[in-house]
Amino acid sequence: MGGRVPTAAHGLAMRTILVVEDEPKIATLVRDYLSAAGFSVLIAGDGDDALRQAKSARPDLMVLDLGLPKRDGLDVIRDVRRFSEMPIVILTARGDESDRIVGLELGGDDYVVKPFSPKELVARVRAIFRRSERNAAPSDVIHAGDITVDTQRLRVTVGDRVVDLTATEMQLLAKLAAEPGRVFTRGQLLDAVHGVAFESYERAIDGHIKNIRRKVEPDPSRPRYILTVYGVGYRFTDQFREQR
Ligand code: CA
C-alpha cells in the first residue's frame, strides 16, 4: 500500500517488505514499525494477494502470517519457493510448533511467535538482511568468540586448541555456523549429515549436539555458541557478528 520510495538516505536502494497478514490491526502495526526502520512496505491480506504481489512487486523479503484466508501460509511458502528465494519470516500462533517446523522446512528463514513484539520482528528482519549480505561473500572460516570453524578444511579450534570432532559433528557444526542466527530444524540438520549419519531418527541430532557442546562450549550446560530453539531445533549464535 502506498507508493514505493526508491532510495534511502545513504543512497542504497530501499528494501521492500511484503507483509502478509489478514488482521488489519496487526498489518498496520507491522507496517508502521518496518517503515520507521527504513523499509518500504507492501501489505497483502490473503494468500492469493500475497502470491500476486510477490510476483509483480518482487519484494526483498516477506513477513508471512500462517493462518490466512483463501490460501494457507504454508501453501504460500511452497508456491513462492517455485519462483523466488526471497527470505520469509513466518508469524505463527503460540503452540503451533508443527506449523513452525513445517514452515521452516518448506523454506521459511525464521519465525516470530504471536503475540510478538514489533521491535523483535524488525530485529529479525535486519538480521536476515545482514546474513544474506554476508552470504553474498561467503567465508569458509567462521569466527565467533573463541571458536573458529573452517568449513572447508573441516577443522575447529577453541582458542589455540584443535577440537577433535567426528565427521557427523563437524558437518552439523559447519551447517549451523555457516549461517549464524538462522534456526535449523532437526530435520534440516539430519539432511545436512545425510550420507554420514545412519540414524533416521531426528532426536539423534540432540545427541550429536550434546557431544559438540561438550567439546567446544566453555560450559556445556549453558551454551554460548550452539543455542537451543525450544520445540524447533538449534541455531548458532549471531552475538559475535559485530566484532568481525
Ligand atoms: Ca491470521
Image (spheres, rainbow, N blue to C red):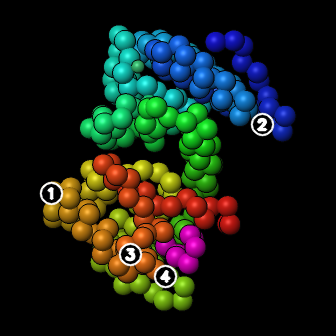
Q: Earlier in the sequence, mark 3 or mark 2?
A: 2
For residue 203, side relative to residue 139 (left or right)? left
Q: Are marks 1 and 4 in contact (CB under 8 Å)?
A: no
Callout 2: helix, strand or loop? loop
Task: Residue at 43% x, 69% y: name it.
Answer: 223
Task: Tell me, yes or no, if residue 104 can be seen here.
Answer: yes
Task: Residue at 60% x, 23% y: name it.
Answer: 29
Task: Find disc 1 in the rendering and name its residue.
Answer: 200
Task: Find disc 3 in the rendering and name its residue.
Answer: 220
Query: How far, Cα to Cα, is label 1 from label 4?
Result: 29 Å
Query: How far, Cα to Cα, is label 4 from label 3?
Result: 16 Å
Q: Are marks 4 and 3 in contact (CB under 8 Å)?
A: no
Task: Find disc 4 in the rendering and name its residue.
Answer: 157
Callout 1: helix, strand or loop? loop
Task: Find disc 2 in the rendering and name its residue.
Answer: 12
Look at the image and give the residue range highlighted in magenta.
143-149
Amino acid found under the numbered disc labelled 1: Ser
> Is residue 145 on the magenta stretch?
yes
Callout 3: helix, strand or loop? loop
Callout 4: helix, strand or loop? strand
Q: Are marks 1 and 3 in contact (CB under 8 Å)?
A: no
Ligand 1 - quadrant of the structure image: top left
Q: Earlier in the sequence, mark 4 or mark 3?
A: 4
Query: How far, Cα to Cα, is label 3 from label 2?
Result: 42 Å
x and y, in percent, of residue 202 in the image? 21, 55
Amino acid found under the numbered disc labelled 3: Pro
Classified by dominant secondary structure, the portion drawn in magenta counts as: strand
